[in-house]
């Protein structure tokens, strides 16, 4: 059995090596059809002994694909794009399937990643990308369809759970150039056939990827008018139409569409999951709970009706945990978070959320650390202890954090993380001089191997606060070059603003960093410094700064100051947001 990989490429140096490496133990032949690369794509492909063919680009993906198929000599053909790669651990499974299958095509499960730097967040689809040679060809200038080469061949597809990584949906990759290429091709096809539901769907996808939900919905609505529920794209069309309506705050219409989808495709639990998310966002918690419980009881959907990952388990457990947390039912919230952690035990966000719940549930704070430790298989393994200490610091349980820190303080791995945690322990003791030294050690380290999130950025934030609190000139001399050398200009300007060295106006994207620093200053009770630093709020281009300030007061326990700033926002700016309403309902308006 011989397998040929067929690819069409143009300027794919970013991902092509990763793609070719992933199939090295599977394919016997690599066919690369290049349509005009000017980067290192071909050089990289040659390192994998690829057969390179040049082919002019004619604005027709189907034609280019078929040219690649014509060069293949294998019994089976695998088609991948450069930004796709097989999970290496699934290779043997795929080989076994190809040896025994009687089908002429194999469906693979695509993980379309949507979160930079993480493979935890993705949506899914099923795609037929392995098929017998001389059985199929492609048709269509864009979003080309795989069809039998003649009517004597019956399509026989075996769907599998063999996984493919796909990085093309990341914002850094699905940019303007792709849309500028794709939209004219689709428009040309629509000029010939304005009622082509599939191409209307494709056009909607282009605008959806550009976050233009109004235009996307326009094309999805037109596609839906001529839908054919037997075609593979139709379940996706319903789902994306509902998402657009939800983004446009037309939630009743979105719920109606999801209801139609459930009637047409009752095994598609992602419709129910999205319905639950909408109910939850509108505080219809009973209905939301019902939806998420249905997802869990239904089990996994067929691959062709799966758009999101793990809605039958992990995602629904998390959502139920969030709902019970909002309802102050902490034991029940924790039970669902623990069920989710049972499926993904390294999901740090849930570990931190579980720590928060344990802190709320146990007046005896010594129990919190012990209960948190039980979530890990080994309470002395450095990776686990780093997270335990970080969680306890986040919960302001400083003595407990210090006790666990003793387990790792002399370790010679994850040195950046250890110095970062040491700095924070000293910082909360108001030992700013030694805390500053620890944070500078992190910032000057050349190792950059750390487990905890944003260690470098957060260390610089803490170092700036240490300087502001102590005003030592030698600290300024050590700090200034690090700030001036920053590549992130917005973060750099934030630090300079706190040091009274710039008066730029900040976009909303700068708010999280600014508010983190303000919150930390308030947390260590440096009230004079906090008052001085509030002037930075005048440099933020937002009408919600008073509400954001209210939230800073609220999370630090100053509820009356939170109320005062919410009232100021309403009176002076006529602005009130959902978070402020939640604070009012929880703390001031509801009866005790």
Image: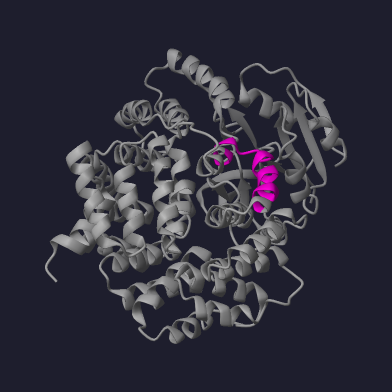
Q: Residue 31 in magenta? A: no
The quadrant in which residue 129 appears is: top right
Identify the colour scheme used.
one colour
Q: Percent position (x, y) of residue 469?
A: 53, 57
Is 422 located above or below residue 42 in the figure?
A: below
Task: Kindly identify the residue that appears in the image at 17 percent across and 41 percent down.
Answer: 571
Q: Main secondary structure of the magenta part?
A: helix
Q: Which residues are magenta?
A: 475-492
Q: Nearer the viewer, residue 182 or 455?
A: 455
Q: Residue 489 in magenta? A: yes
Question: Is any part of residue 293 visible from this angle?
Answer: yes
Is 592 located above or below residue 276 in the figure?
A: below
Q: Nearer the viewer, residue 337 or 581?
A: 581
Task: Kindly identify the residue that appears in the image at 54 percent across and 23 percent down.
Answer: 182
Task: Kindly identify the residue that appears in the image at 72 percent across and 37 percent down.
Answer: 14
Q: Percent position (x, y) of residue 280?
A: 27, 56
Q: Percent position (x, y) of residue 164?
A: 62, 50
Q: Nearer the viewer, residue 122 or 134?
A: 122
Task: Kindly identify the residue that appears in the image at 14 percent across and 60 percent down.
Answer: 589
Q: Percent position (x, y) of residue 315?
A: 42, 61
The quadrant in which residue 551 appears is: bottom left
Is 590 located above or below residue 42 in the figure?
A: below
Q: Nearer the viewer, residue 451 or 59?
A: 451
Name the image quarter holding the C terminus: bottom left
The quadrant in which residue 63 appears is: top right
């Amino acid at each position: 059995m011989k397998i040929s990989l067929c690819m069409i490429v143009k300027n794919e140096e970013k991902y092509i090596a990763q793609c070719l490496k992933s199939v090295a133990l599977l394919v016997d032949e690599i066919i690369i059809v290049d349509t005009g690369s000017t980067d290192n794509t071909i050089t990289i492909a040659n390192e994998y002994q690829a057969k390179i063919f040049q082919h002019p680009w004619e604005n027709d993906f189907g034609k280019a694909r078929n040219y690649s198929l014509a060069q293949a000599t294998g019994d089976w053909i695998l088609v991948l794009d450069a930004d796709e790669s097989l999970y290496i651990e699934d290779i043997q499974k795929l080989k076994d399937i190809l040896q025994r299958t009687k089908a002429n095509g194999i469906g693979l499960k695509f993980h379309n990643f949507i979160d930079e730097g993480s493979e935890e967040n993705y949506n899914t689809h099923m795609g037929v990308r392995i098929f017998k040679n001389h059985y199929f060809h492609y048709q269509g200038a864009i979003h080309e369809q795989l069809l039998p080469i003649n009517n004597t061949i019956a399509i026989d597809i075996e769907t599998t759970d063999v996984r493919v990584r796909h990085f093309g949906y990341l914002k850094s990759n699905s940019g303007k150039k792709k849309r500028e290429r794709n939209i004219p091709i689709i428009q040309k096809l629509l000029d010939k056939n304005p009622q082509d539901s599939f191409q209307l769907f494709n056009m909607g996808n282009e605008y959806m990827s550009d976050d233009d939900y109004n235009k996307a919905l326009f094309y999805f609505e037109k596609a839906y008018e001529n839908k054919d529920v037997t075609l593979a794209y139709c379940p996706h069309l319903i789902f994306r139409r509902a998402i657009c309506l939800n983004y446009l705050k037309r939630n009743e219409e979105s719920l109606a569409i999801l209801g139609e989808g459930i009637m047409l495709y009752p095994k598609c639990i992602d419709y129910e999951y999205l319905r639950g998310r909408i109910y939850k966002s509108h505080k219809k918690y009973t209905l939301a709970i019902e939806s998420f419980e249905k997802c869990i009881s239904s089990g996994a959907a067929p691959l062709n009706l799966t758009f999101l990952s793990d809605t039958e388990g992990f995602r629904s457990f998390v959502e139920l945990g969030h709902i019970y947390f909002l309802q102050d039912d902490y034991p029940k919230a924790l039970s669902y978070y623990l069920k989710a952690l049972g499926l993904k035990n390294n999901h740090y966000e849930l570990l931190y959320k579980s720590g928060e719940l344990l802190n709320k549930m146990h007046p005896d704070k010594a129990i919190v650390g012990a209960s948190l430790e039980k979530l890990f298989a080994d309470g002395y393994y450095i990776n686990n202890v780093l997270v335990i200490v970080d969680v306890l610091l986040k919960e302001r349980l400083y003595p407990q954090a210090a006790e666990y820190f003793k387990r790792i303080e002399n370790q010679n791995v994850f040195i950046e993380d250890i110095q970062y945690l040491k700095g924070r322990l000293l910082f909360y003791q108001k030992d700013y001089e030694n805390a500053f030294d620890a944070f500078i050690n992190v910032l000057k380290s050349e190792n950059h191997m750390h487990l905890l999130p944003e260690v470098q950025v957060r260390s610089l934030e803490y170092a700036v606060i240490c300087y502001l609190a102590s005003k030592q000139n030698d600290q300024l001399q050590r700090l200034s070059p690090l700030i001036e050398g920053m590549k992130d200009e917005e973060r750099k300007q934030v630090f300079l603003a706190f040091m009274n060295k710039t008066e730029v106006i900040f976009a909303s994207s700068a708010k999280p960093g600014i508010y983190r620093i303000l919150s930390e200053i308030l947390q260590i009770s440096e009230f004079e410094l906090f008052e001085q630093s509030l002037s930075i709020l005048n440099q933020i281009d937002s009408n919600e700064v008073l509400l954001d300030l209210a939230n800073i007061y609220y999370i630090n326990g100053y509820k009356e100051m939170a109320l005062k700033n919410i009232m100021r926002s309403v009176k002076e700016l006529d602005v009130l947001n959902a978070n402020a309403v939640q604070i009012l309902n929880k703390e001031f308006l509801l009866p005790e």
